Image (cartoon, rainbow, N blue to C red):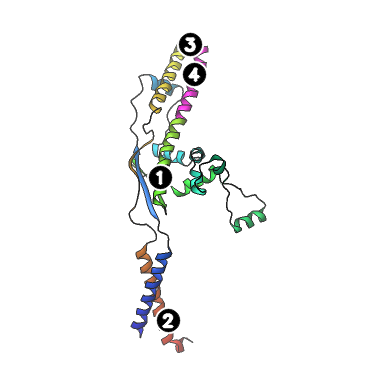
Amino acid sequence: VFVKRSLYALGASLLLSCFIVQISTPFFSVSSTLREAETAASAPMGIDAASAFFGASGDKSGPGEEFRSNMNSYFLAQRMWNKGWGSRIFGNGDLNEEYFNKIPKRQTISDRVSAFISGYKLYDYYSANDLQAYIKGSIVVRKRVYDENVTIITKTQSKDFAIEFMNAVILETDQYAKERLILKSNEIIKATYSQLAVSKNSMIASALASTINSEYFKIANLDNDLPHLLDVIDPPHSSEYPVAPKVSAIFLSSAIIFLFASILFSFIQKNKEDLW
């Protein structure tokens, strides 16, 4: 009787496991591997010293951390939003600006009740802030200590969309970093020219001129199609098999639960007089 009941339990667990697997949505892992981009040719002699003299030293954070910071920034999300990614994620994909700036938010009943009780107002439309939260919550940047490679990972139901979106994020993040530095260099050049026009000290004037040359050199290295922060080693690609749900774990855990329940039921049925 015990063996027969255990077989019934295993059969029931098998049916339940098959049902769970059938109704579960498979998630795939999409990843890309990046490496620190090769540095441009060194600046002419004297330029680095002049830049250091005026405190215009480079960013001390590594390319990986700078990439992560830029990728998670609102400004990157705004650029992606203006290219219609907000519409593709939160709406119907319409790239009409009048549409993707007025994508209505579908608030849950619990959110509406909480807002009513607490006295705050919910936003009616999606915005670049929501896209920023989506990027932060869906794309993970990993870098091991003493490892030059940076891995970008996300889990998704739609492999093709995730690959396209990750590739766009990588390219746009690098482009944003370059344009930000170019804008900074142009402002430094503008301010330095103003100081150079009124400077009467030859040494200071020479240092100011070197600073201008340094910033022009930076712009020349940035104003191109080459990667600035990280170079793509492995482009975004998807795993062949889903990473979730774990089919083997579902079948194994279900079998253990049903078998334990069968043993417990047999024990209670056999010793019910002693137990009660």
User: Which SS class for mark 2?
Assistant: helix
Q: Position of residue 167 (x, y in %)?
A: 39, 42
Label 3 and label 2: CA atoms lie apart by 95 Å
Which of the marked residues, 4 or 3, is nearer the chain's N terminus? 4
Crowding at label 1, few (<14), some or many (≥20) Cα neighbours within 10 Å?
few
Residue type highlighted by circle 2: Phe
195 within the magenta span = yes
Residue type highlighted by circle 4: Thr
Residue type highlighted by circle 3: Asn
Range covered by the magenta-colored residues: 180-199
The secondary structure that most of the magenta stretch takes on is: helix
Mark 2 touches mark 4? (CB < 8 Å):
no
Mark number, residue 265: 2
Of labels 1 and 3, the one closer to you: 1
Crowding at label 2, few (<14), some or many (≥20) Cα neighbours within 10 Å?
some
Label 1 and label 3: CA atoms lie apart by 55 Å
- At 41% across and 68% down in the image, what residue appears? 19
Which of the marked residues, 1 or 4, is nearer the chain's N terminus? 1
- At 49% across and 37% down in the image, what residue appears? 79
Mark number, residue 192: 4
Instruction: Determine whether 127 is above or below 243 in the image.
Output: above
Label 4 and label 3: CA atoms lie apart by 14 Å
Which of the marked residues, 2 or 4, is nearer the chain's N terminus? 4
Crowding at label 4, few (<14), some or many (≥20) Cα neighbours within 10 Å?
some
Which of the marked residues, 1 or 3, is nearer the chain's N terminus? 1
Residue type highlighted by circle 1: Glu
